Image: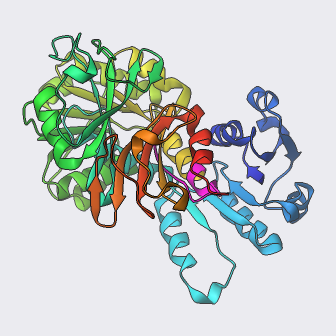
């Protein structure tokens, strides 16, 4: 596949790094925006502005398959996508940062009078980040949460505390709840798929898949005692903070926002109903103490400044907060945040890359989620005739993988070794990212 990327931004670099090995990549931007990271990749670079049709033609847009606009200027991304669509009919993916553009362009796609002159996929990273944060913070102590099969099945990730009853036990002896499978273990920097003889250590991150009910029981048994998230503080009242607060209000979770800008506070107080809006600096330890932030179940720092989010998260951990969650703008900072004690660090760019990856997949395989900053993937694959009536134990995977969930029409099955696959079953498979292509190929019917 030939992909043209407009924007030598961090997202542009992440996209090029992600896809250059399997696809032909051309990046368009001004020469001064080209960083050393691009020079390390086997890609083409075209100088210029992609809103110029001649520049698009120089990038061989007429013979390309996908055009992705990800500069830091929304208007340039939109015009470039529409120009590319006009002259070539190419598939277009447009990144935007403003809510009004996202809504307007999504609505325009459905209007018949536009014909084929529209943008195929509008990606608003802040909305994807908000969805991810909401899933994580509403499940007590979970490091990651993914929902499958219309919410009937889930993936949950938990960290093993030194005092946990699981420390020192082999997986087969843990007595995990029925309809639950442990699909992955993150130990230090290493992520692997365990077996029954794998011994669990303190500070391991355990990744489970199963029915939503079974995972609720598992969580209550091993990771918290029927504990629910009741109070959340949000540091930063920007777009993400506002949308997250609105979602929490719908869940009737007690929440408060600390925002430094007074005018923004007035706006938040008008659009939010039950959220307490506080005008102040989230890095002010005295303010945090006065507002009893330490008593909150979760504190989420979502300003657009990594350093401020890191400092705020460290401060609230000192005040006794159970979980500190931080937004990270620079993806490379995520490991640093976690190493210094931040419970969860998430990036809108990571969420956006996952969206693009799934959109570009040409097979009938969907990537439902990525885990641990892309080290593992959750694949959705339909069972074809070659695998009809085959038992799970008889499958010869070319790489480590686990079928965590099978969706059979409206039924959700947590498979065992003797479970038989049926035609048109939907398998939800956990595997390491480096093994994903082999698993896809294995289930591909020629």
- In the displayed structure image, the side of residue 245 where residue 377 appears, left or right: right
Q: Name the quadrant of the C terminus.
A: bottom right
- In the displayed structure image, the side of residue 89 where residue 279 appears, left or right: left
Residue at (11%, 39%) from the top-left corner?
228
Q: Does the stretch in magenta take in 423?
A: no
Residue at (76%, 52%) from the top-left corner?
3
Q: Which residues are magenta?
A: 357-369
- In the displayed structure image, the side of residue 298 where residue 183 appears, left or right: right
Residue 74 visible in the current orientation: no
In this view, the residue in front, 331 or 258, is: 331
Where in the figure is residue 115, as x and y percent of width and height?
66, 85
Residue at (79%, 35%) from the top-left corner?
34
Placement of 120 over or under 426, stated as above or below: below
Where in the figure is residue 369, as x and y percent of width and height?
45, 45
- Quadrant of the rendered structure where residue 51 is? bottom right
Residue 121 visible in the current orientation: yes
Placement of 200 over or under 402, stated as above or below: above
Residue at (39%, 51%) from the top-left corner?
239
Q: Residue furthest bottom?
A: 113
């Amino acid at each position: 596949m030939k992909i043209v990327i407009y924007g030598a931004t961090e997202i542009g670099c992440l996209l090029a790094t992600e896809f250059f090995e399997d696809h032909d990549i051309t990046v368009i931007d001004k020469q001064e925006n080209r960083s050393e990271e691009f020079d390390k990749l086997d890609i083409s670079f075209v100088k210029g502005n992609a809103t110029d049709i001649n520049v698009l033609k120089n990038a061989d847009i007429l013979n390309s398959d996908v055009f992705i606009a990800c500069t830091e200027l929304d208007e340039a991304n939109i015009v470039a996508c529409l120009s590319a669509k006009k002259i070539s009919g190419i598939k277009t993916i447009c990144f935007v940062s403003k809510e009004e553009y996202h809504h307007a362009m999504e609505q325009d796609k459905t209007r018949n009078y536009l014909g084929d002159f529209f943008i195929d996929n509008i990606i608003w990273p802040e909305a994807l980040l908000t969805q991810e944060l909401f899933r994580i913070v509403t499940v007590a102590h979970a490091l990651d949460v993914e929902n499958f099969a219309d919410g009937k099945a889930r993936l949950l990730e938990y960290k093993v505390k030194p005092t946990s009853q699981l420390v020192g036990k082999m997986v087969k002896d843990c007595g995990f709840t029925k309809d639950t499978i442990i699909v992955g273990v993150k130990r230090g920097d290493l992520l692997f798929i365990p077996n029954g003889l794998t011994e669990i250590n303190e500070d391991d991150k355990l990744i489970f898949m199963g029915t939503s009910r079974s995972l609720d029981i598992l969580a209550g048994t091993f990771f918290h005692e029927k504990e629910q998230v009741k109070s959340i503080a949000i540091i930063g009242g920007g777009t993400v903070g506002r949308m997250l607060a609105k979602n929490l209000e719908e869940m009737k979770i007690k929440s408060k926002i600390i925002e430094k800008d007074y005018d923004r506070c007035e706006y938040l107080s008008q659009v939010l109903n039950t959220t307490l809006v506080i005008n102040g600096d989230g890095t002010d330890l005295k303010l945090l103490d006065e507002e009893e932030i330490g008593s909150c179940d979760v504190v989420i720092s979502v300003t657009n400044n990594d350093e401020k989010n890191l400092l705020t998260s460290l401060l609230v951990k000192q005040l006794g907060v159970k979980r500190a969650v931080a937004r990270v703008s620079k993806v490379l900072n995520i490991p640093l945040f976690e190493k210094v004690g931040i419970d969860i660090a998430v990036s809108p760019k990571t969420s956006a890359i996952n969206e693009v990856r799934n959109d570009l997949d040409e097979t009938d395989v969907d990537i439902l989620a990525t885990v641990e900053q892309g080290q593992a993937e959750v694949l959705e694959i339909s069972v074809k005739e070659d695998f009809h009536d085959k038992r799970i134990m008889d499958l010869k995977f070319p790489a480590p993988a686990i079928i965590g969930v099978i969706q059979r029409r409206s039924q959700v099955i947590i498979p065992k070794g003797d479970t038989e696959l049926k035609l048109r079953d939907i398998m939800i498979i956990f595997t390491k990212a480096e093994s994903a292509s082999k698993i896809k190929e294995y289930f591909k019917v020629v």
